Image (tube, rainbow, N blue to C red):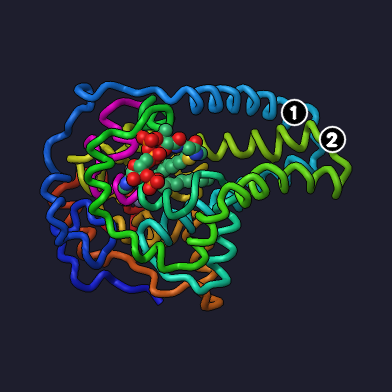
Amino acid sequence: TVKMAPNIKDGTDLNGVLFEDDASTPDMALARAPIQHADSHPRQLVWRNIILFAYLHVAALYGAYLFLFSAKWQTDIFAYILYVMSGLGITAGAHRLWAHKSYKAKWPLRVILIIFNTMAFQDSAIDWARDHRMHHKYSETDADPHNATRGFFFSHIGWLLVRKHPDLKKKGKGLDLSDLYDDPILRFQKKYYLILMPLACFVMPTVIPVYCWGESWLNAFFVAALFRYTFILNVTWLVNSAAHKWGHKPYDSSIKPSENISVSVFALGEGFHNYHHTFPWDYKTAELGNNRLNFTTNFINFFSKIGWAYDMKTVSDEIVKNRVKRTGDGSHHLWGWGDKD
Ligand code: ST9
Ligand code: ZN
Ligand code: ZN
């Protein structure tokens, strides 16, 4: 079942995160205020993160070398499968299900997604969704965790290397996260994160290649754990950096998020970012009716066939068309894939 958002009229959806209640949030006026710069706020470097991320990226380069020249082919395929699984834990799980509530999932699918999500180690889904709701609600202001107006580096990785802006912490108190805390699966993951995450992201990916096809510990750890993990991190961050910088803006030319095909391919369908920021409740995170270049949408559609995913929210062609006319940059004919213009 796919639902059209019933009571959202075009124009009231700006920066909406949750399709039921967002347009009525008083802070919405603030969220649309002119772009603010964070220069007045001194950066507080977090050296622990700087050192860990520096190590991780050097180790991942070594892992990439082993991936190409040393690991068994089974290990390479395994790393690829883990990339898709943990990627879905972010896209179908943390992003479309938990941050945006763009569809509903029965508990077996939620269990699958929380396992995938823990393999991706991007912090608990509750914390991820909290940051992401801020990212939409206060997009490109100081209260946006990876505010793209602070530059490519900050929106890519820099935001994880410094203390958060005081504005974010202040405004963040106003978020309603009760839907997330109501789910025992999400509470369980957050409570035991420091045990579950190392097992799912580092131990399991290392042990399986060693015991199942006799891979070396070195190859298994650097390829299936560190290289695979760091690769997905960077793909995810590219949505915040590259897809907030390069590409067309067929739906809303007043914001930085853009339609970026290259990012979409690696991010399992999450690079159609101008659409996504314009219509954030759409479970497809893209207009394309036929789900091209959108593996995550196909994944959710598959589970809707067996009844584990339901109540998917989307946007009517009519609303999209009006919005394109009113605020688009005129490039929609390149993006409607011939079936909407
Ligand atoms: C990682 C996450 O990489 C990546 C997320 C990317 C998002 C992408 C979105 C794009 C769209 C989707 C596309 C997906 C594509 C995927 C493709 C896959 C193939 N609201 O955080 P703290 C308050 S993680 C409300 O410690 P500091 C709160 O009271 C990588 N309140 O701030 C909080 O206390 P508590 C691995 C908030 O001290 C308190 O402030 N993880 C909010 O300034 C302190 O919070 C890491 O490396 C909020 N949003 O530290 C860890 N935020 O939590 C990195 C905060 O107790 N993080 N508050 O409630 C850190 O080390 C720290 O957070 C810090 C800031 C140093 C960055
Ligand atoms: Zn964004
Ligand atoms: Zn989003």
- The reply to whether residue 105 is in sight is yes
Please state the horizontal and vertical placement of residue 163, each as a whole percent of the image.
Answer: 36, 30
Q: Does the residue labelled 2 lie within 8 Å of ligand 1?
A: no
Q: Does the magenta stretch include residue 312?
A: no
Q: Residue type at mark 2?
A: Ser
Does the CB distance between marks 2 and 1 fall below 8 Å? no
Q: Is residue 85 left or right of residue 172?
A: right
Residue in the picture at 49% in, 46% down = 123
Please state the horizontal and vertical placement of residue 330, each as a whole percent of the image.
Answer: 20, 43
Between 168 and 69, the residue placed more toward the observer is 168
Q: Mark 2 or 1 closer to N-term? A: 1
Q: Which residue was labeled with disc 1?
A: 66
Between 214 and 67, the residue placed more toward the observer is 214
Please state the horizontal and vertical placement of residue 162, each as a whole percent of the image.
Answer: 38, 27
The crowd level at tag 1 (other Cα within 10 Å; few <14, some 14-19, many 20+) is some
Q: In which quarter of the image is residue 218?
A: top right
Q: Which residue was labeled with disc 2?
A: 216
Instruction: Give the Cα separation between the discs numbered 2 and 1.
Output: 11 Å
Residue in the picture at 38% in, 31% down = 159
Residue in the picture at 19% in, 22% down = 40
